[in-house]
Amino acid sequence: SMAVAVAALIAFSVVAVRGTGKMITFLFLGGFYLISAAAVLLLRDPDFAIWFQAVFNVVLVGVGIRLILSGISQGISHYFFLGIASILATALMRYADLIGDYIGGAILFMVFAALLLGAARFWKKYQGRDSLAGLSRKGGRKI
């Protein structure tokens, strides 16, 4: 059943990425995933799964940071918040895998809420500064 879910997600991703100019990035990450999944299945050693899990966590955090930086530099809120969501989802998965009790979960969700609130306030402040700069450059008109 997991193979069906993975195949559906890959098909959805191909449809979503097509026409955005991000196909090379998708092919790199998708190829890395397929190679690592094939290696774990063929080698039948659970230690390889742990190493690939660690590598994927680093890749997810790296992609999240890259999305945040792209969102800030290009002024695209979707990239910014997708990067935040990527990092938070990775942290949540690692937490559930490693610790996973109720009190810790409540604290973790409060920390995530504070991070999202801080990210939203940062974005609002950044956008407000950018729009004020546009007003002064164009003689009082917004760009």
Image: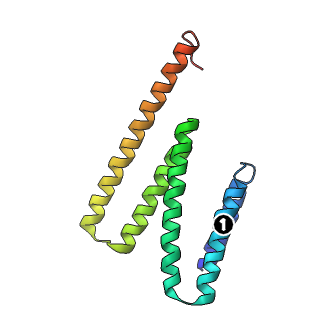
Task: Establish if 30 lies above or below 71.
Answer: below
Quarter of image, res 123: top left
Compare residues 5 and 62 and report the one nearer the observer: 62
Q: Where is residue 103 in the image (x, y as percent from the top left)?
A: 24, 65
Q: Can residue 88 be seen in this view?
A: yes
In which quadrant will I find the N terminus? bottom right
Q: Could you tell me which residue is drawn at 43 percent across and 67 percent down?
A: 93
**Residue extending furthest toward the top:** 139
Q: Position of residue 78 (x, y in %)?
A: 55, 44
What residue is shown with label 1?
Answer: 30
Compare residues 108 and 4 and report the one nearer the observer: 108
Task: Describe residue 117's horizontal placement relative to residue 26 as left or right.
Answer: left
Task: Describe residue 5's horizontal placement relative to residue 11 as left or right.
Answer: left
Q: Could you tell me which residue is drawn at 74 percent across and 54 percent down?
A: 18
Task: Describe residue 125's horizontal placement relative to residue 44 as left or right.
Answer: left
Q: Where is residue 110 in the image (x, y as percent from the top left)?
A: 30, 54
**Residue extending furthest toward the right:** 19
Q: Is residue 12 visible?
A: no
Q: Could you tell me which residue is drawn at 31 percent across and 53 percent down?
A: 111
Amino acid type, residue under disc 1 in the picture: Gly
Give the SS element for disc 1: helix
